[in-house]
Image (cartoon, coloured by chain):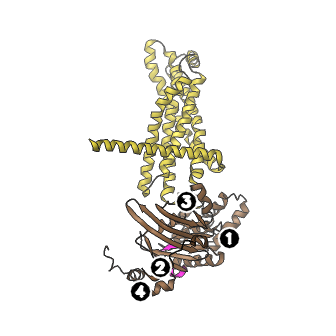
Amino acid sequence: MVRFLSAVGRAFLSLFQYLGEVVLLAADTFRSIFTRRLRWKLFLHQIVEIGLLSQLVVVITGGFTGAVFAAQTYFQFNKLGIGSGVGAVVSVSLCRELGPVLTALMVTGRVGAAMSAEIGTMKVTEQIDALRALAVYPVDYLVVPRALAMMLSMPLLVAECIAFGIAASYFIAVHLLEINGTYYMANMIRWTGIRDITMGLTKGLCFAVLIVFISCHKGLTAREGAVGVGKATTEAVVNASLAVLICNFFLTMFLNIIFPAGYQ
Amino acid sequence: MPNSSEQLVPDSAAPTVSMISVRGLTKSLGSQEVLRGIDLDVRRGETLAIIGRSGGGKSVLLKNIIGLMNPDAGEIWVDGRNIIGLNERQLAAIRQKVGILFQGAALFDSMTVAENVAFPLREAGERDASVLREKVREMLEVVELEGQEDKMPVSLSGGMKKRVGLARSIVRRPSCVLYDEPTSGLDPVVSDSINRLITRLQERLGMTSIVVTHDMKSAFQVGNHIAYLHEGRIYFHGTPSELQQASDPILQDFLLGRSESQPHL
Protein backbone atom coordinates (compact mmCIF):
# COMPACT_ATOMS: atom_id res chain seq x y z
CA MET A 1 0.00 0.00 0.00
CA VAL A 2 2.82 2.38 0.95
CA ARG A 3 4.60 1.47 -2.26
CA PHE A 4 1.45 2.18 -4.28
CA LEU A 5 0.92 5.53 -2.59
CA SER A 6 4.53 6.51 -3.10
CA ALA A 7 4.31 5.57 -6.82
CA VAL A 8 1.16 7.67 -7.21
CA GLY A 9 2.84 10.52 -5.32
CA ARG A 10 5.90 10.31 -7.56
CA ALA A 11 3.72 10.40 -10.68
CA PHE A 12 1.88 13.49 -9.43
CA LEU A 13 5.13 15.21 -8.45
CA SER A 14 6.64 14.56 -11.85
CA LEU A 15 3.44 15.82 -13.54
CA PHE A 16 3.52 19.03 -11.49
CA GLN A 17 7.23 19.45 -12.17
CA TYR A 18 6.58 19.05 -15.92
CA LEU A 19 3.70 21.53 -15.86
CA GLY A 20 5.84 23.94 -13.86
CA GLU A 21 8.66 23.74 -16.40
CA VAL A 22 6.27 24.43 -19.30
CA VAL A 23 4.72 27.38 -17.44
CA LEU A 24 8.18 28.79 -16.63
CA LEU A 25 9.19 28.47 -20.29
CA ALA A 26 6.01 30.32 -21.27
CA ALA A 27 6.67 33.05 -18.69
CA ASP A 28 10.27 33.39 -19.89
CA THR A 29 9.10 33.63 -23.49
CA PHE A 30 6.47 36.29 -22.80
CA ARG A 31 9.06 38.27 -20.81
CA SER A 32 11.40 38.07 -23.83
CA ILE A 33 8.63 39.10 -26.23
CA PHE A 34 8.08 42.33 -24.32
CA THR A 35 11.67 43.14 -23.36
CA ARG A 36 13.95 41.86 -26.16
CA ARG A 37 14.29 42.75 -29.82
CA LEU A 38 12.42 40.45 -32.19
CA ARG A 39 14.43 38.56 -34.81
CA TRP A 40 12.15 39.42 -37.74
CA LYS A 41 13.81 37.06 -40.19
CA LEU A 42 13.26 34.06 -37.91
CA PHE A 43 9.72 35.20 -37.14
CA LEU A 44 8.82 35.48 -40.83
CA HIS A 45 10.43 32.11 -41.52
CA GLN A 46 8.21 30.57 -38.83
CA ILE A 47 5.13 32.31 -40.26
CA VAL A 48 5.86 30.50 -43.53
CA GLU A 49 6.53 27.16 -41.77
CA ILE A 50 3.52 27.31 -39.47
CA GLY A 51 0.99 29.42 -41.32
CA LEU A 52 1.63 29.19 -45.03
CA LEU A 53 2.71 25.55 -45.26
CA SER A 54 -0.19 24.34 -43.08
CA GLN A 55 -2.79 25.71 -45.49
CA LEU A 56 -3.39 22.55 -47.49
CA VAL A 57 -3.74 20.33 -44.42
CA VAL A 58 -6.17 22.75 -42.79
CA VAL A 59 -8.23 23.27 -45.95
CA ILE A 60 -8.61 19.51 -46.50
CA THR A 61 -9.42 18.93 -42.83
CA GLY A 62 -12.01 21.71 -42.72
CA GLY A 63 -13.52 20.87 -46.08
CA PHE A 64 -14.06 17.17 -45.53
CA THR A 65 -15.18 17.62 -41.92
CA GLY A 66 -17.81 20.15 -43.03
CA ALA A 67 -18.93 17.89 -45.85
CA VAL A 68 -19.31 14.74 -43.77
CA PHE A 69 -20.90 16.63 -40.88
CA ALA A 70 -23.46 18.15 -43.23
CA ALA A 71 -24.30 14.73 -44.66
CA GLN A 72 -24.66 13.05 -41.26
CA THR A 73 -26.76 15.89 -39.85
CA TYR A 74 -28.98 15.84 -42.93
CA PHE A 75 -29.58 12.06 -42.61
CA GLN A 76 -30.96 12.63 -39.08
CA PHE A 77 -32.67 16.00 -39.54
CA ASN A 78 -34.39 15.11 -42.78
CA LYS A 79 -36.40 12.40 -41.02
CA LEU A 80 -37.76 15.12 -38.75
CA GLY A 81 -38.43 17.47 -41.65
CA ILE A 82 -35.87 20.07 -40.54
CA GLY A 83 -33.24 19.47 -43.25
CA SER A 84 -32.74 23.21 -43.77
CA GLY A 85 -31.38 23.41 -40.20
CA VAL A 86 -28.24 21.56 -41.26
CA GLY A 87 -26.41 24.82 -42.09
CA ALA A 88 -26.94 26.25 -38.62
CA VAL A 89 -25.77 23.09 -36.85
CA VAL A 90 -22.70 22.70 -39.06
CA SER A 91 -21.59 26.32 -38.85
CA VAL A 92 -22.06 26.68 -35.08
CA SER A 93 -20.30 23.36 -34.45
CA LEU A 94 -17.43 24.27 -36.76
CA CYS A 95 -17.00 27.70 -35.20
CA ARG A 96 -17.23 26.64 -31.58
CA GLU A 97 -15.66 23.16 -31.53
CA LEU A 98 -14.64 21.33 -34.68
CA GLY A 99 -12.73 24.12 -36.40
CA PRO A 100 -10.39 25.02 -33.53
CA VAL A 101 -9.92 21.46 -32.23
CA LEU A 102 -9.25 19.80 -35.58
CA THR A 103 -6.96 22.61 -36.70
CA ALA A 104 -5.05 22.36 -33.43
CA LEU A 105 -4.66 18.59 -33.78
CA MET A 106 -3.46 18.90 -37.38
CA VAL A 107 -1.02 21.70 -36.51
CA THR A 108 0.25 19.66 -33.56
CA GLY A 109 1.03 16.76 -35.88
CA ARG A 110 2.57 18.86 -38.60
CA VAL A 111 4.25 21.76 -36.79
CA GLY A 112 4.55 20.67 -33.14
CA ALA A 113 6.39 17.51 -34.13
CA ALA A 114 8.74 19.45 -36.41
CA MET A 115 9.46 22.03 -33.69
CA SER A 116 10.23 19.39 -31.12
CA ALA A 117 12.43 17.39 -33.52
CA GLU A 118 14.33 20.44 -34.77
CA ILE A 119 15.03 21.89 -31.34
CA GLY A 120 15.71 18.41 -29.93
CA THR A 121 18.29 17.71 -32.64
CA MET A 122 19.95 21.05 -31.89
CA LYS A 123 20.02 20.07 -28.22
CA VAL A 124 21.67 16.67 -28.67
CA THR A 125 24.20 17.99 -31.21
CA GLU A 126 25.29 20.75 -28.78
CA GLN A 127 23.96 23.51 -31.07
CA ILE A 128 21.90 24.92 -28.22
CA ASP A 129 24.98 24.90 -25.99
CA ALA A 130 26.76 26.69 -28.85
CA LEU A 131 24.02 29.34 -28.87
CA ARG A 132 24.42 29.82 -25.13
CA ALA A 133 28.20 29.90 -25.41
CA LEU A 134 27.87 32.61 -28.08
CA ALA A 135 25.88 34.69 -25.57
CA VAL A 136 22.54 34.05 -27.30
CA TYR A 137 19.69 33.04 -25.02
CA PRO A 138 17.98 30.02 -26.67
CA VAL A 139 14.49 31.14 -25.61
CA ASP A 140 14.98 34.48 -27.41
CA TYR A 141 16.36 32.82 -30.52
CA LEU A 142 14.33 29.62 -30.80
CA VAL A 143 11.12 29.93 -28.81
CA VAL A 144 10.06 33.58 -29.21
CA PRO A 145 9.81 33.55 -33.05
CA ARG A 146 7.94 30.22 -32.98
CA ALA A 147 5.56 31.35 -30.23
CA LEU A 148 4.69 34.62 -31.94
CA ALA A 149 4.28 32.99 -35.34
CA MET A 150 2.09 30.25 -33.85
CA MET A 151 -0.10 32.71 -31.94
CA LEU A 152 -0.59 34.78 -35.08
CA SER A 153 -1.10 31.84 -37.45
CA MET A 154 -3.44 29.61 -35.43
CA PRO A 155 -6.49 31.92 -35.27
CA LEU A 156 -6.11 32.52 -39.02
CA LEU A 157 -5.83 28.80 -39.71
CA VAL A 158 -8.89 28.16 -37.54
CA ALA A 159 -10.83 30.79 -39.49
CA GLU A 160 -9.74 29.16 -42.74
CA CYS A 161 -10.76 25.72 -41.49
CA ILE A 162 -14.19 27.01 -40.48
CA ALA A 163 -14.69 28.84 -43.79
CA PHE A 164 -13.81 25.82 -45.91
CA GLY A 165 -15.91 23.57 -43.67
CA ILE A 166 -18.97 25.79 -44.12
CA ALA A 167 -18.36 26.11 -47.85
CA ALA A 168 -18.06 22.33 -48.24
CA SER A 169 -21.16 21.73 -46.15
CA TYR A 170 -23.12 24.19 -48.31
CA PHE A 171 -21.95 22.47 -51.46
CA ILE A 172 -22.91 19.01 -50.18
CA ALA A 173 -26.22 20.12 -48.66
CA VAL A 174 -27.46 22.23 -51.54
CA HIS A 175 -26.01 20.48 -54.60
CA LEU A 176 -25.91 16.86 -53.45
CA LEU A 177 -28.61 16.53 -50.79
CA GLU A 178 -30.88 19.10 -52.45
CA ILE A 179 -31.67 21.26 -49.44
CA ASN A 180 -33.03 24.66 -50.35
CA GLY A 181 -30.05 26.99 -50.46
CA THR A 182 -31.92 30.08 -49.31
CA TYR A 183 -33.31 28.39 -46.21
CA TYR A 184 -29.95 26.79 -45.56
CA MET A 185 -28.17 30.17 -45.59
CA ALA A 186 -30.92 31.96 -43.71
CA ASN A 187 -30.85 29.44 -40.85
CA MET A 188 -27.09 29.45 -40.77
CA ILE A 189 -26.87 33.24 -40.55
CA ARG A 190 -29.67 33.39 -38.02
CA TRP A 191 -28.08 30.92 -35.62
CA THR A 192 -24.42 31.77 -36.11
CA GLY A 193 -23.19 34.97 -34.52
CA ILE A 194 -19.95 36.88 -34.03
CA ARG A 195 -19.83 35.28 -30.56
CA ASP A 196 -19.37 31.84 -32.17
CA ILE A 197 -16.58 33.02 -34.44
CA THR A 198 -14.88 34.87 -31.59
CA MET A 199 -15.05 31.75 -29.44
CA GLY A 200 -13.40 29.67 -32.18
CA LEU A 201 -10.62 32.18 -32.74
CA THR A 202 -10.04 32.54 -28.98
CA LYS A 203 -9.72 28.78 -28.71
CA GLY A 204 -7.27 28.84 -31.62
CA LEU A 205 -5.08 31.32 -29.77
CA CYS A 206 -5.21 29.26 -26.56
CA PHE A 207 -4.34 26.05 -28.43
CA ALA A 208 -1.43 27.85 -30.14
CA VAL A 209 0.04 28.64 -26.73
CA LEU A 210 -0.37 25.02 -25.60
CA ILE A 211 1.15 23.52 -28.77
CA VAL A 212 4.14 25.83 -29.04
CA PHE A 213 5.26 25.62 -25.42
CA ILE A 214 4.72 21.87 -25.04
CA SER A 215 6.62 21.22 -28.30
CA CYS A 216 9.48 23.63 -27.61
CA HIS A 217 9.84 22.36 -24.03
CA LYS A 218 10.11 18.78 -25.23
CA GLY A 219 12.76 19.81 -27.75
CA LEU A 220 14.75 21.81 -25.22
CA THR A 221 14.78 18.91 -22.76
CA ALA A 222 15.56 16.14 -25.29
CA ARG A 223 18.47 13.89 -24.41
CA GLU A 224 20.24 10.67 -25.36
CA GLY A 225 20.81 11.19 -29.08
CA ALA A 226 18.52 10.10 -31.90
CA VAL A 227 16.37 7.94 -29.61
CA GLY A 228 15.88 10.89 -27.29
CA VAL A 229 14.82 13.16 -30.15
CA GLY A 230 12.33 10.54 -31.36
CA LYS A 231 10.95 10.17 -27.86
CA ALA A 232 10.70 13.92 -27.37
CA THR A 233 8.86 14.31 -30.68
CA THR A 234 6.35 11.57 -29.87
CA GLU A 235 5.76 12.95 -26.38
CA ALA A 236 5.33 16.47 -27.75
CA VAL A 237 2.60 15.35 -30.17
CA VAL A 238 0.83 13.16 -27.60
CA ASN A 239 1.02 15.72 -24.79
CA ALA A 240 -0.02 18.65 -26.98
CA SER A 241 -2.94 16.68 -28.47
CA LEU A 242 -4.15 15.63 -25.03
CA ALA A 243 -3.71 19.15 -23.70
CA VAL A 244 -5.78 20.52 -26.59
CA LEU A 245 -8.60 18.02 -25.99
CA ILE A 246 -8.65 18.44 -22.21
CA CYS A 247 -8.34 22.23 -22.28
CA ASN A 248 -11.03 22.40 -24.95
CA PHE A 249 -13.60 21.15 -22.43
CA PHE A 250 -12.67 23.77 -19.86
CA LEU A 251 -12.43 26.49 -22.49
CA THR A 252 -15.91 25.55 -23.75
CA MET A 253 -17.36 25.79 -20.25
CA PHE A 254 -15.59 29.07 -19.53
CA LEU A 255 -16.03 30.77 -22.90
CA ASN A 256 -19.73 29.81 -22.99
CA ILE A 257 -20.21 32.22 -20.10
CA ILE A 258 -18.69 35.05 -22.15
CA PHE A 259 -20.01 33.98 -25.55
CA PRO A 260 -23.23 32.03 -24.77
CA ALA A 261 -24.39 29.61 -27.42
CA GLY A 262 -27.78 29.75 -29.13
CA TYR A 263 -30.05 32.34 -30.68
CA GLN A 264 -29.87 35.63 -28.78
CA MET B 1 50.83 13.85 -5.16
CA PRO B 2 53.75 15.44 -7.03
CA ASN B 3 55.39 18.54 -5.63
CA SER B 4 54.58 20.71 -8.61
CA SER B 5 50.86 20.44 -7.93
CA GLU B 6 51.35 21.58 -4.34
CA GLN B 7 53.37 24.57 -5.55
CA LEU B 8 50.58 25.56 -7.88
CA VAL B 9 47.68 25.23 -5.47
CA PRO B 10 46.19 28.72 -5.87
CA ASP B 11 46.11 31.14 -2.95
CA SER B 12 43.09 33.17 -1.97
CA ALA B 13 44.24 36.25 -3.91
CA ALA B 14 44.49 34.36 -7.18
CA PRO B 15 41.12 35.30 -8.78
CA THR B 16 42.21 38.87 -9.41
CA VAL B 17 45.44 38.02 -11.26
CA SER B 18 44.16 35.08 -13.28
CA MET B 19 41.89 35.05 -16.31
CA ILE B 20 40.18 31.95 -14.92
CA SER B 21 40.25 30.61 -11.38
CA VAL B 22 38.42 27.60 -10.08
CA ARG B 23 38.05 26.90 -6.36
CA GLY B 24 36.79 23.68 -4.78
CA LEU B 25 34.62 22.78 -7.75
CA THR B 26 32.52 19.65 -7.35
CA LYS B 27 30.04 18.22 -9.82
CA SER B 28 28.06 15.00 -9.91
CA LEU B 29 26.25 13.57 -12.90
CA GLY B 30 23.55 11.27 -11.58
CA SER B 31 25.13 9.17 -8.86
CA GLN B 32 28.67 9.61 -10.20
CA GLU B 33 30.85 12.29 -8.64
CA VAL B 34 32.78 13.53 -11.67
CA LEU B 35 34.63 16.49 -10.17
CA ARG B 36 35.67 16.21 -6.53
CA GLY B 37 37.16 19.57 -5.66
CA ILE B 38 38.99 21.20 -8.53
CA ASP B 39 41.38 24.09 -7.82
CA LEU B 40 42.86 25.65 -10.92
CA ASP B 41 44.31 28.93 -12.16
CA VAL B 42 44.88 30.06 -15.71
CA ARG B 43 46.97 33.18 -16.10
CA ARG B 44 46.20 35.77 -18.77
CA GLY B 45 47.77 34.95 -22.12
CA GLU B 46 48.84 31.43 -21.20
CA THR B 47 47.67 28.14 -22.66
CA LEU B 48 46.76 25.47 -20.15
CA ALA B 49 46.36 21.94 -21.43
CA ILE B 50 44.12 19.77 -19.26
CA ILE B 51 44.82 16.11 -19.81
CA GLY B 52 43.21 13.04 -18.33
CA ARG B 53 41.54 9.82 -19.23
CA SER B 54 38.39 9.67 -21.31
CA GLY B 55 35.29 10.13 -19.16
CA GLY B 56 37.38 11.75 -16.44
CA GLY B 57 35.39 14.98 -16.35
CA LYS B 58 37.54 17.24 -18.54
CA SER B 59 34.66 18.38 -20.74
CA VAL B 60 32.42 18.74 -17.68
CA LEU B 61 35.03 21.05 -16.15
CA LEU B 62 35.13 23.12 -19.34
CA LYS B 63 31.33 23.41 -19.48
CA ASN B 64 31.28 24.51 -15.85
CA ILE B 65 33.85 27.21 -16.58
CA ILE B 66 31.67 28.80 -19.26
CA GLY B 67 28.46 28.29 -17.27
CA LEU B 68 26.88 25.66 -19.53
CA MET B 69 26.68 23.42 -16.47
CA ASN B 70 26.11 24.44 -12.86
CA PRO B 71 28.53 23.02 -10.29
CA ASP B 72 27.30 21.44 -7.07
CA ALA B 73 29.78 23.48 -5.02
CA GLY B 74 32.78 25.73 -5.46
CA GLU B 75 33.60 28.99 -7.17
CA ILE B 76 34.51 29.88 -10.75
CA TRP B 77 36.05 33.27 -11.42
CA VAL B 78 36.24 34.50 -15.01
CA ASP B 79 38.05 37.78 -15.59
CA GLY B 80 37.63 38.71 -11.93
CA ARG B 81 33.93 37.84 -11.66
CA ASN B 82 32.44 34.90 -9.83
CA ILE B 83 29.99 33.33 -12.27
CA ILE B 84 28.28 31.04 -9.76
CA GLY B 85 24.63 31.99 -9.30
CA LEU B 86 24.46 34.16 -12.44
CA ASN B 87 21.46 33.58 -14.67
CA GLU B 88 21.68 32.98 -18.44
CA ARG B 89 21.33 36.66 -19.32
CA GLN B 90 23.99 37.71 -16.81
CA LEU B 91 26.28 34.97 -18.10
CA ALA B 92 25.99 36.39 -21.63
CA ALA B 93 28.35 39.23 -20.68
CA ILE B 94 30.93 36.68 -19.46
CA ARG B 95 30.48 34.51 -22.54
CA GLN B 96 31.35 37.42 -24.81
CA LYS B 97 34.83 37.28 -23.28
CA VAL B 98 35.17 33.51 -23.53
CA GLY B 99 34.84 31.46 -26.73
CA ILE B 100 34.52 27.69 -26.81
CA LEU B 101 35.29 25.13 -29.48
CA PHE B 102 33.05 22.13 -28.92
CA GLN B 103 34.27 18.58 -29.39
CA GLY B 104 31.94 18.08 -32.39
CA ALA B 105 32.29 21.74 -33.45
CA ALA B 106 28.50 22.23 -32.89
CA LEU B 107 28.06 24.19 -36.11
CA PHE B 108 24.53 25.34 -36.92
CA ASP B 109 23.63 22.80 -39.58
CA SER B 110 21.03 24.98 -41.30
CA MET B 111 23.60 27.72 -41.98
CA THR B 112 26.52 27.96 -44.40
CA VAL B 113 30.10 28.30 -43.22
CA ALA B 114 29.96 32.08 -43.71
CA GLU B 115 26.66 32.35 -41.81
CA ASN B 116 28.08 30.28 -38.96
CA VAL B 117 31.16 32.48 -38.66
CA ALA B 118 29.16 35.69 -39.01
CA PHE B 119 26.54 34.55 -36.46
CA PRO B 120 28.15 36.08 -33.33
CA LEU B 121 28.67 39.38 -35.16
CA ARG B 122 25.06 39.49 -36.39
CA GLU B 123 23.83 38.75 -32.90
CA ALA B 124 26.01 41.58 -31.60
CA GLY B 125 24.12 43.91 -33.95
CA GLU B 126 26.43 44.10 -36.97
CA ARG B 127 24.22 44.49 -40.06
CA ASP B 128 26.63 45.84 -42.69
CA ALA B 129 27.00 43.03 -45.24
CA SER B 130 30.40 44.21 -46.47
CA VAL B 131 31.79 44.37 -42.92
CA LEU B 132 30.43 40.90 -42.19
CA ARG B 133 31.86 39.52 -45.43
CA GLU B 134 35.26 41.00 -44.72
CA LYS B 135 35.36 39.70 -41.12
CA VAL B 136 34.29 36.23 -42.25
CA ARG B 137 36.96 36.22 -44.95
CA GLU B 138 39.57 37.35 -42.43
CA MET B 139 38.61 34.65 -39.93
CA LEU B 140 38.53 31.92 -42.56
CA GLU B 141 42.00 33.01 -43.61
CA VAL B 142 43.18 32.68 -40.00
CA VAL B 143 41.88 29.10 -39.87
CA GLU B 144 43.14 28.40 -43.42
CA LEU B 145 39.72 27.83 -44.97
CA GLU B 146 39.63 30.57 -47.59
CA GLY B 147 36.94 30.17 -50.23
CA GLN B 148 34.74 27.78 -48.22
CA GLU B 149 32.14 30.41 -47.31
CA ASP B 150 29.20 28.86 -49.13
CA LYS B 151 29.61 25.26 -48.02
CA MET B 152 27.15 23.65 -45.61
CA PRO B 153 28.51 21.97 -42.47
CA VAL B 154 27.33 18.56 -43.66
CA SER B 155 29.77 18.70 -46.58
CA LEU B 156 32.81 19.51 -44.39
CA SER B 157 35.36 17.05 -43.01
CA GLY B 158 35.90 16.73 -39.24
CA GLY B 159 38.99 18.94 -39.32
CA MET B 160 37.26 21.60 -41.40
CA LYS B 161 34.28 21.63 -39.05
CA LYS B 162 36.59 22.24 -36.10
CA ARG B 163 38.30 25.07 -37.97
CA VAL B 164 34.95 26.69 -38.78
CA GLY B 165 33.90 26.22 -35.14
CA LEU B 166 37.11 27.88 -34.07
CA ALA B 167 36.63 30.77 -36.52
CA ARG B 168 33.12 31.27 -35.10
CA SER B 169 34.34 31.25 -31.51
CA ILE B 170 37.12 33.80 -32.11
CA VAL B 171 35.41 36.13 -34.57
CA ARG B 172 34.47 38.52 -31.77
CA ARG B 173 38.04 38.37 -30.43
CA PRO B 174 37.33 36.94 -26.96
CA SER B 175 40.05 37.20 -24.32
CA CYS B 176 39.93 33.48 -23.71
CA VAL B 177 39.16 30.37 -25.78
CA LEU B 178 38.27 26.94 -24.40
CA TYR B 179 39.02 23.97 -26.65
CA ASP B 180 37.20 20.70 -26.01
CA GLU B 181 39.25 17.87 -27.56
CA PRO B 182 40.31 19.95 -30.58
CA THR B 183 42.24 17.09 -32.22
CA SER B 184 40.07 14.08 -31.37
CA GLY B 185 39.12 12.00 -34.40
CA LEU B 186 41.54 13.83 -36.70
CA ASP B 187 44.51 12.42 -38.57
CA PRO B 188 48.01 13.44 -37.36
CA VAL B 189 48.56 16.03 -40.08
CA VAL B 190 45.24 17.81 -39.46
CA SER B 191 45.83 17.52 -35.69
CA ASP B 192 49.18 19.21 -36.09
CA SER B 193 47.65 22.03 -38.11
CA ILE B 194 44.98 22.58 -35.42
CA ASN B 195 47.71 22.64 -32.75
CA ARG B 196 49.70 25.17 -34.74
CA LEU B 197 46.55 27.24 -35.11
CA ILE B 198 45.98 27.28 -31.35
CA THR B 199 49.58 28.34 -30.77
CA ARG B 200 49.33 31.01 -33.46
CA LEU B 201 46.16 32.46 -31.92
CA GLN B 202 47.89 32.71 -28.57
CA GLU B 203 50.91 34.41 -30.11
CA ARG B 204 49.07 36.70 -32.55
CA LEU B 205 46.02 37.65 -30.52
CA GLY B 206 47.35 37.06 -26.99
CA MET B 207 44.37 34.85 -26.14
CA THR B 208 44.23 32.84 -22.95
CA SER B 209 43.45 29.22 -23.80
CA ILE B 210 42.38 26.07 -22.04
CA VAL B 211 42.82 22.97 -24.16
CA VAL B 212 41.15 19.82 -22.93
CA THR B 213 42.68 16.79 -24.58
CA HIS B 214 43.87 13.26 -24.09
CA ASP B 215 46.27 13.67 -27.01
CA MET B 216 49.67 14.00 -25.30
CA LYS B 217 51.40 15.31 -28.40
CA SER B 218 48.84 18.08 -28.62
CA ALA B 219 49.16 18.89 -24.89
CA PHE B 220 52.94 19.23 -25.12
CA GLN B 221 52.74 21.21 -28.35
CA VAL B 222 50.25 23.87 -27.23
CA GLY B 223 50.48 23.99 -23.42
CA ASN B 224 52.54 26.49 -21.42
CA HIS B 225 51.24 24.54 -18.44
CA ILE B 226 49.67 21.12 -18.21
CA ALA B 227 47.16 19.96 -15.62
CA TYR B 228 46.40 16.26 -15.16
CA LEU B 229 42.85 15.52 -14.06
CA HIS B 230 42.69 12.25 -12.17
CA GLU B 231 39.72 10.85 -10.25
CA GLY B 232 37.98 14.20 -10.18
CA ARG B 233 40.92 16.22 -8.89
CA ILE B 234 43.87 18.10 -10.37
CA TYR B 235 46.59 15.55 -9.70
CA PHE B 236 49.38 17.48 -11.39
CA HIS B 237 49.77 21.08 -12.53
CA GLY B 238 53.12 22.12 -13.96
CA THR B 239 55.11 22.90 -17.05
CA PRO B 240 55.48 20.35 -19.86
CA SER B 241 59.10 19.72 -18.86
CA GLU B 242 58.08 19.14 -15.22
CA LEU B 243 55.53 16.62 -16.43
CA GLN B 244 58.08 14.84 -18.60
CA GLN B 245 60.46 14.56 -15.65
CA ALA B 246 57.80 13.40 -13.19
CA SER B 247 58.45 9.97 -11.79
CA ASP B 248 54.99 9.52 -10.28
CA PRO B 249 53.67 6.12 -11.46
CA ILE B 250 50.18 7.39 -12.25
CA LEU B 251 51.58 10.15 -14.46
CA GLN B 252 54.02 7.73 -16.03
CA ASP B 253 51.23 5.28 -16.83
CA PHE B 254 49.25 8.04 -18.55
CA LEU B 255 52.22 9.47 -20.44
CA LEU B 256 53.33 6.07 -21.67
CA GLY B 257 49.79 4.78 -22.24
CA ARG B 258 50.21 1.78 -19.88
CA SER B 259 47.11 -0.03 -18.66
CA GLU B 260 48.75 -2.85 -16.61
CA SER B 261 48.62 -0.96 -13.30
CA GLN B 262 44.99 0.07 -13.78
CA PRO B 263 43.19 -2.57 -11.67
CA HIS B 264 39.73 -1.90 -13.08
CA LEU B 265 40.75 -2.31 -16.72
Q: Quick one: quadrant of the C terminus of chain A?
A: top right
| Quadrant position of residue A170 | top right
Which of label 4 and label 2 is nearer to you?
Answer: 2
Picture coordinates of residue B42 (x, y %)? Answer: 56, 74
Hue used for the chain lettered A:
yellow
Under mark 1, the amino acid is Glu
SS for callout 3 = loop
Magenta-colored span: B211-223
Q: Which chain is brown?
A: B
Disc 1: which residue: B138
Asked whether disc 1 touches disc 3, contact meaning CB atoms under 8 Å apart, the reply is: no
Q: Residues within 10 Å of mark 3 (few under 14, many from 20)?
A: some
Q: Chain of mark 1?
A: B
Crowding near pointer 2: few (<14 within 10 Å), some, many (20+)? Answer: few
Q: Earlier in the sequence, mark 4 or mark 2?
A: 2
Label 4 to label 2, Cα distance in Å?
A: 16 Å
Left or right for B138, reference B196: right
Amino acid beneath label 4 = Ser
The residue sitting at 56% across, 53% down in the picture is A138
| Residue for badge 4 | B247
The correct choice, above or below, for B240 with respect to A207 in the image is: below
Screen quadrant of the N terminus of chain A: top left
The circle on residue B109 is 3
Q: CA distance from mark 1 to mark 3?
A: 22 Å
